[in-house]
Image (cartoon, rainbow, N blue to C red):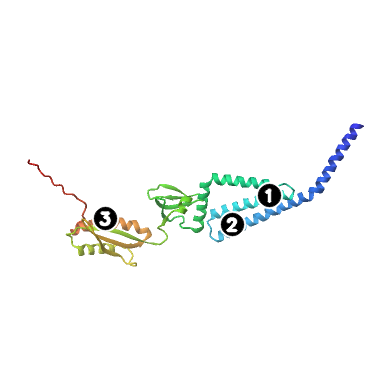
Amino acid sequence: MEELNQVTQQVDQYTELAIQFITQYGGKVVLAILTLIIGLWIIGKIGRAAEKAMVAAKVEKSLAIFLEKLGTIILKVLLLISVAGMVGIETTSFIAVFGAAGLAVGLALQGSLSNFAGGVMILLFKPFKVGDFVEAQGYAGVVQEIQIFNTIIHTGDKKTIIIPNGNLSNGNIVNYSTSPLRRVDMVFGIGYDDDLKKAKEVLCRLVDEDDRVLKDPEKLVVVSALADSSVNFTVRAWVNSADYWGVFFDMHEKVKLTFDAEGISIPYPQQDVHLYKNEG
């Protein structure tokens, strides 16, 4: 009989404790659950709306998705901290832990964060895009892919170069694809004994005969230097960007062949050696 009374007393105690807990925390728990459910729904709506807004603003899709997920994670963490505070859990320690963890991660990933920031700047301000021919960090090639942390370019000899975005965003970038036109700059030398006017006429004719050279802007053929062993002509011709190297290489070959046919010399460095016999 005594054992039955003890069991009954324990049940009454546990029931009383449960009633006290429900009375004290039941409303807070229900409110916290409702806040969590509604908060997650609102965060989802905000994330989708933000992604659509960035896509409409022509932000790079990969960047838009990344920023949407990052913002969603931050909002969810803040929501969980708020819900924990609603049910009476001390959140100061959580905030301190998150702050310390964030500082440690930031110091450990300092280089990666720099590359991430550089990638965001490149994707937002778009100094170049996929398909552009650029020169940066000592490399020149066609941009194949712009990632969050790195940019991948292919050189003319099919090498794949991976450049960290941190260095790329803080360095000089030459984008050859910004303008549809490019100017081909060439220098050709003739001997001092050669006919200057004839050489100029030959150069003008060769430029005019190339259909890839544009009439506007007009070409330029001028004497640019009286060098040590040659009279140098500077030839400048405007072409479409895609024709740049074709015109550059073809013009050098045509000039050499035509100068040879016309009897115009192309000087090259040479050295005279005099030998003296000592008869002493």
Which numbered disc covers residue 81? 1
Q: Residue at the right extreme?
A: 1
Which structural element holds mark 1? helix
Residue 36 appears left or right of 10: left
Along the viewing direction, whichever of 88 and 28 lies nearer the viewer = 88
Which numbered disc covers residue 227? none
Residue 270: give x, y in percent of width and height: 19, 50
Dot 1, how many residues are within 10 Å of its Cα: few (below 14), some (14-19), or many (20+)?
Answer: some
Residue 85: give x, y in percent of width and height: 72, 49
Label 3 vs 1, first from the N-terminus: 1
Is there a contact, CB below 8 Å, between mark 1 and mark 2? Answer: no
Q: Residue 225 lies in what quarter of the image?
A: bottom left
- Residue at image point 57% right, 45% down: 105
Dot 3, how many residues are within 10 Å of its Cα: few (below 14), some (14-19), or many (20+)?
Answer: few
- Residue at image point 65% right, 48% down: 95
Residue 93: give x, y in percent of width and height: 67, 45
Mark 3 lies on residue: 253
Q: Residue 49 lies in what quarter of the image?
A: bottom right
Residue type beneath disc 2: Glu
Which structural element holds mark 2? helix
Mark 2 lies on residue: 51
Residue type beneath disc 1: Ile
C-alpha gap between disc 3 and disc 1: 73 Å
